[in-house]
Amino acid sequence: TVGFIEENVYSSTDNLDYYPAGGNGTFEINASTIEFNDIGVWTANFDWNLILNGIYDFTLNGNELVISANKNDVGFYKYELIKE
């Protein structure tokens, strides 16, 4: 779950198994990208690419927001979010 709380602030639910990890901080939207700037403190026992942080491509279709990124040449990370 990702909450866009107020102008340019987000919070993402973290899970005990770190999948996905979560994150919270600020974001900035450009033409076809969104950049998340996580402010959390994290342990080193999981894939940090699961933290919602950095630049992602996005598409918005009705109530569906899809964000994706090729992170550090490790893998392709894609999140499909539905507005409640």
Image (cartoon, grey):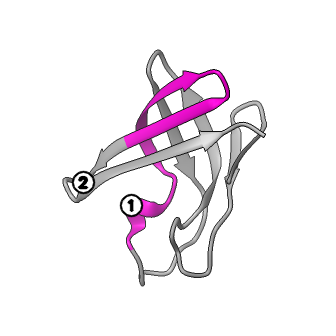
Give the residue type that dot 2 points to: Asn
| Residue at 64 percent of width and 42 percent of height | 26
In the rendered image, the residue lying farthest to the top is 31
- Would you name the residue on which mark 1 appears? 49
Image coords of residue 48 (percent x, y):
41, 67
Q: Residues within 10 Å of mark 1 (few under 14, many from 20)?
A: some
The correct choice, above or below, for 32 with respect to 48 in the image is above
Give the residue type that dot 1 points to: Asn
Quarter of the rendering containing residue 55: top left
| Residue at 24 percent of width and 54 percent of height | 72
In the rendered image, the residue lying farthest to the bottom is 45
Q: Residues within 10 Å of mark 2 (few under 14, many from 20)?
A: few
- Would you name the residue on which mark 2 appears? 72
The correct choice, above or below, for 48 with respect to 16 in the image is above
Q: How far separated are the C-alphas under marks 2 and 1?
A: 8 Å
Tell me where the magenta segment starts and ends, as one range: 47-68
The residue tagged with tag 2: helix, strand or loop? loop
Instruction: Assess whether residue 82 is covered by the magenta stretch.
Output: no
> Looking at the figure, which quarter contains the N terminus?
bottom right
| Observer-nearest of 41 and 60 | 60
| Residue at 62 percent of width and 73 percent of height | 15
| Observer-nearest of 16 and 31 | 16
Quarter of the rendering containing residue 32: top left
Q: Is 10 situated left or right of 74 in this image?
A: right
> Looking at the figure, which quarter contains the C terminus?
top right
First reached walking from the N terminus: tag 2 or tag 1 = 1
Image coords of residue 27 (percent x, y):
60, 37
The correct choice, above or below, for 17 with respect to 64 in the image is below
Marks 2/1 in contact by CB < 8 Å: the verdict is: yes
Quarter of the rendering containing residue 9: top right
